[in-house]
Image (cartoon, helix red, strand yellow):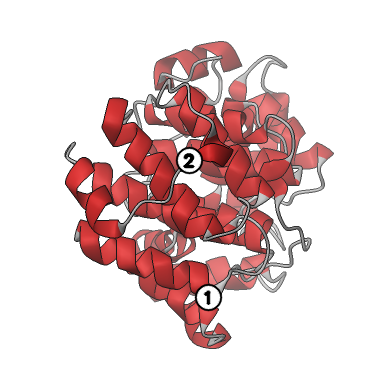
Amino acid sequence: MKLIHPTGSEALACLRAMRTVTAGDGPIPPAAHALMDAARRILMSLDADIDGLMPISPHETAAAVTTPGMAEQLVHALIVGVLLDGEPDPAAFRRLQDFAAALGIQTPALRTVQLLIQRHMLLFRLDFLRRSHIADMVRDSYRQGGLLGMAEAVLGQRGLYEDAELAARFEALGRLPQDSFGHVYYTHCRGNGFAFPGERGGFPYAGAYHDMTHVLSGYGITPEGEMLLGGFMAGYKQTNPFYVILLTALLWGAGVNATPLSQPHITGLMARDGLADEFLIAIERGSRVTTDLSDNWDFWPLMPLPLDEARARLGIAA
């Protein structure tokens, strides 16, 4: 997933659309404001007063947005903007729908958020999960081991199954040199109390890349770190990357947990100083990674290498 950098009148139209959808006739909510300001500086290089922006109609916006792919990126940004500041406003979502229609964008994420707005929570979670990277893990578990492999992955995470041979392979990473990717990953998991794939309560093997991405990217496991990790993962992911960003907006913006795991209830996280800037930078860092780490990535050959060398081989910048 690569971010488009709009310029001039196109960039200004995008900012005005974001302001119109998220704020209506009122002030821009804090987290949406932070994201708009970060986009203005990092993606657009615009000298504009966000709070003084004039509203714009959906059809004006459609006429101004002409760069290939920009309409879809704008609609995705509008979706995130509607979710960033707590419980989403139905009026803001209706404005979003008008802009998406004018721009000719019918992204599945609109349906996902609509179910949330309408409070159809079971359908919302099912719709989100079937399109998300969580579903990708389930599919990968099935490809690697069939129905049995998929069942073992689910039961293992619930503490009802263990694979001693697989667990031992991960445990052996602790005997690698201390500066190696494998040893740092081992320390990350053991230090945070995370079980390895194969151990009871461990993440499925197909999802091991998540904590490896923490190590490779340098982003921590705080809510802020997880939000940045989501941006980084969306950058390198080739299938449904926006749903990783959507998850971060749901969890840490709207305060809605769409995952099967318990999560702290936090809203408006993007408003914290500097986080919006870091989030956009994380997406750009992730977009330069040369391998989709979520797509059956064979990480074992990199484990003995020094962490810096493993990063370099994957195109991960400091």
First along the sequence among labels 2 and 1: 2
Q: Residue at x 79, y 40 (%)?
A: 190
Which quadrant of the figure contains the C terminus? top right
Residue 301 coordinates in the image, percent (x, y): 45, 26
Nearer to me, 237 or 34: 34
Disc 2 designates what residue?
A: 53
- Amino acid identity at mark 2: Leu
Image-based side of 144 in relation to 211, left or right: left
Nearer to me, 281 or 288: 281
Nearer to me, 175 or 227: 227
Image-based side of 67 in relation to 250, left or right: left
Tell which tag, 2 or 1, sits nearer the viewer. Answer: 2
Disc 1 designates what residue?
A: 90
Residue 48 coordinates in the image, percent (x, y): 48, 27
- Amino acid identity at mark 1: Pro
For mark 1, does the 10 Å Cα neighbourhood hold few (<14), some (14 to 19), or many (20 or more) residues?
Answer: some
Q: Residue at x 47, y 34 (%)?
A: 283
